[in-house]
Image: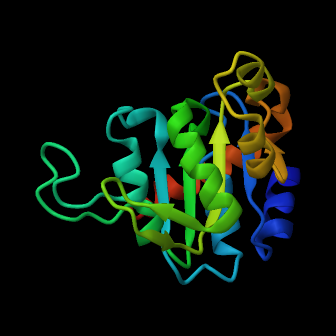
Amino acid sequence: LNRAIDKSIKVANSDISVLVTGESGVGKENIPKIVHQYSHRKHSKYIAVNCGAIPDGTIDSELFGHEKGAFTGATANRSGYFEVADGGTIFLDEVGELPLATQVRLLRVLETGEFIKVGSSKVEKTNVRIVAATNVKMEEAIRKGKFREDLFYRLSTIIIDIPPLRNRKEDIPLLFRKFASDFAQKYNM
């Protein structure tokens, strides 16, 4: 855990993308917060998006926004997470669950900082730091055609792997102190 935290702090001041890997429940969501808090973007927005929880039909609208009338129910223009997080950090949790069409759009953001809202033809710019996380074995997903290899390479400039707790028993006292501290603070003890 200390190695993962040290690596997060070291890469924080750059703007390169980070991919956090590990099984479900290992605490991958803490690494992007550390990266953001130690970066020059710390006073800007931090937005966490659970890509696996957003239905395929609305994920592009959530990430990139949409124009009024772009689809049934689009009664007003809407800013997406990439527009809202401009200047800050966006955490894409469960990035391995993204549909292939959305992966193409995300690749464009990583390459050029550009995106197009759903129902628009106007190119928008964003300046965000992307930190992604997944519990999917990415090499296997690429081999099966479920994840784009070029997107994987763009996201994984730095990989921070969080092993399961069963493989890092020395972290148990550290985690115990953290949980005890959080509990004491929450209940004023």
Q: Residue at x 77, y 51 (%)?
A: 154
Residue reaching furthest to the front: 121
Q: Nearer the viewer, residue 5 or 104?
A: 104
- The quadrant in which the C terminus is found is bottom left
Q: Is residue 156 left or right of residue 179?
A: right
Q: Is residue 81 left or right of residue 16?
A: left
Q: Residue at x 33, y 34 (%)?
A: 57
Which quadrant would residue 14 be assigned to in this image? bottom right
Q: Is residue 103 visible?
A: yes
Q: Residue 24 appears at what percent x and percent y? A: 61, 28
Q: Residue 169 appears at what percent x and percent y? A: 82, 31
Q: Residue at x 65, y 43 (%)?
A: 133
Q: Residue at x 75, y 41 (%)?
A: 152
Q: Nearer the viewer, residue 10 or 52?
A: 52
Q: Residue 18 appears at what percent x and percent y? A: 75, 54
Q: How many marks?
A: 0
Q: Is residue 98 visible?
A: no
Q: Residue 82 appears at what percent x and percent y? A: 47, 64
Q: Nearer the viewer, residue 40 or 26?
A: 40
